Image (cartoon, rainbow, N blue to C red):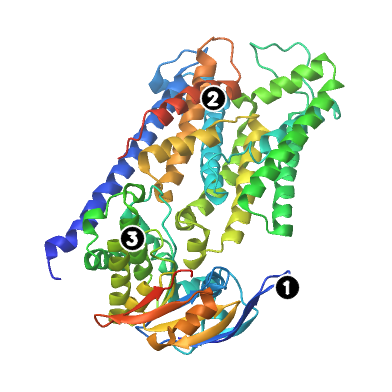
Amino acid sequence: MNHPSLRQQAPEAYARHQGRRAAFLLVLAAALVCAVLVSLWCGSYETPLPELVRGVFGRAGDKSVNTVVRNLRLPRICTALLGGAGLGISGCVLQSVLRNPLASASTLGISQGASFGAAFAIIVLGAGLQSGSSASGAMSFTAPVTISVCAFVCSMAVSLVILALSRLRAITPEAMVLAGVALSSLFSGASTLLQYFADDVQLSSIVFWTFGDLGRTSWREVRIMAAVILAAAAVFLLNRWNYNALESGEHTAVSLGVHVVRLRLWNVLLCSLVCSVVVAYVGVINFIGLVAPHLVRRVVGGNYCWLLPGSALMGALLLLLGDLAARQLLAPVVLPIGAITSFLGAPLFLYMLFKGRDRL
Amino acid sequence: MTVEHLCFSYPCGRKILEDISFHADAGECLAVLGNNGAGKSTLLKCLSHILRPQSGQVLVDGRDILSLSLGELAREAALMAQSAPSTRLTVYDTLLLGRKPYMKWGVSQHDRAVVGDILRQLELEPFAMRYLDQLSGGERQKILLARALVQEPKLLLLDEPTSSLDLKNQYEVLGLVRRFCRERHITAVLVIHDLNLALRFCDRFLFLHSGRVLAFGGPEAVTPANIRAVYGMDAAVERVRGVPVVIPALER
């Protein structure tokens, strides 16, 4: 019974094990910092990096560097960080509470709802593109706030309908996902009908909005996104052991004191809120919420204490790298970010999926 | 532990459990026996709050656990499922999960001490850093028992704990259950199909038939008459080297 060495063995091994996971998160964070610096540096306006970093704090020697950094590059980087982290962490939570590895904002119909909302704003409320803009330059909508509000309202409406259904008839998580798929197709159909009656300019506005663009946000939007995403992330982190319990099956989770139904409702609501805010401001970005948690899971295993922060960091990193690629591949043409994340994310995902398991 | 007049029916009105009453002392193992559909699993779900019974009381140490919140109940009763899902959680993390009912913000020093203690007593230390999906069924079942013990319950509920195990693991797991229940004064309620295993490891026997208690008592309750009533099958109960054994009769 009293072997001090034996007594210490398991905790020490566990500390080492935890240390490796913490190290992985640090590596992710370091990669993220590098990506931020590269992203700060890349652009039509070439400036040495130290000057740019001073520009972040408004202390660059050249006043125009301050302006470019603080008004153009920094909001874009913050949008990528927040959006990616929000999509990553909420994808992670959705996969847990819906017990479905495919769950993400698009399986719940959030993306399709947002697209419909944007199409509605552009066609019915006339919030389309200003004429004279082109794919290479800065594009602007006549009423971006209207589009964001409509996209947000419609995507939230989809998730509220799903939640109301599940509340009404205590349906299973599978049924929630299926309801999401049904509502997705309903809204895609509605969008197609709207587009059928749109003129050329409206149609290109819709397509352009759906592509996604990280450059649409100013500090005001970044602040709103930050408030929603940080608050939600705090709630998610507090629930980390609840997700771990759910991983062992619903009955076991109940026997460990987890209100499974309540947990599912509130978390799906919060995830929908996060995804809707991101999609409303940035446009449809599909793949991050699905890929980021799976990539992290491959390395750190199924413990949500590490999965949640890892998914947020990975999501932010993927979106930032995607944005870099979108801006640099065919510069000065800025490619659509939604397409880039899917285009580069899918091969990466497939590679990780079939490479076999590498664990820390 | 005392269960009094427990009734459960689904909202559609179908009665699953009617007036279930039984009693077991601390440290005893109670086998819930019955044919498929008799209500054994429903009884276990009622005891663990997965289902809410319409009426009745479940007293543990004089407290009605049905009136407790989920969090409070989790400190009184632990559930050991039929089999562990093969997740990518390490054994150590799985055991820490058993401390979930006691956690406020995170894992405390005491939580780690309890987990370390159970790991040592069940001789699971070599497995501590392995993932659940790397273990065999028997090993996983021991991990589930360890997690339930980490919960420090007064009542241990087991849902067919040996149904997917080989002979050696069946005896090993049930032996551990009995040992720890005796040592820690835990009452165990097992849903089990194997009558011989039940006779070997349990102190009390509850026969359920169509949602009602058919018979309840010590090993003497396992009689050919009760077995015939529950399973519709003739069987002899004999002692072989001092061990009571049920020998089902073949169809004539």
Query: Could you tell me the amino acid type at mark 2?
Result: Thr
Which residue is label 3 attached to? B143
**Quadrant in which the C terminus of chain A appears:** top left
Instruction: For label 1, count other residues whose C-alpha is less than 10 Å away and answer few (under 14), some (14-19) or many (20+).
Output: few
- Work out whether disc 2 and disc 3 sit on a shared chain: no
Q: Residue A13 location, x and y as percent?
A: 22, 52
Up-down relation of residue B39 to residue A309 (above or below): below
Which residue is label 2 attached to? A341
Instruction: For label 2, count other residues whose C-alpha is less than 10 Å away and answer few (under 14), some (14-19) or many (20+).
Output: many
Query: Could you tell me the amino acid type at mark 1?
Result: Gly
What is the chain letter for disc 2? A
As drawn, the label of residue A298 is: none
Taking the spot 48% from the left edge, 87% from the top edge, the residue there is B216
Res A222 → quadrant: top right
Taking the spot 35% from the left edge, 72% from the top edge, the residue there is B197
Q: CA distance from mark 2 to mark 1?
A: 52 Å
1 vs 3, front mark:
1
Report the front residue among B27 and A83: B27
Instruction: For label 3, count other residues whose C-alpha is less than 10 Å away and answer few (under 14), some (14-19) or many (20+).
Output: many
Do the residues under discs 2 and 3 have CB atoms within 8 angstroms?
Answer: no
Taking the spot 29% from the left edge, 68% from the top edge, the residue there is B171
As drawn, the label of residue B13 is: 1
Q: Residue A320 location, x and y as percent?
A: 49, 27
Task: Answer with left or right where residue A160 lies relative to residue A348.
Answer: right
Q: Residue A100 location, x and y as percent?
A: 55, 44
Res A194 → quadrant: top right
Up-down relation of residue B212 to residue A196 (above or below): below
- Work out whether disc 1 and disc 3 sit on a shared chain: yes
Taking the spot 59% from the left edge, 39% from the top edge, the residue there is A104
Circle 1 SS class: loop
Task: Answer with left or right where residue B240 lies relative to residue B32.
Answer: left
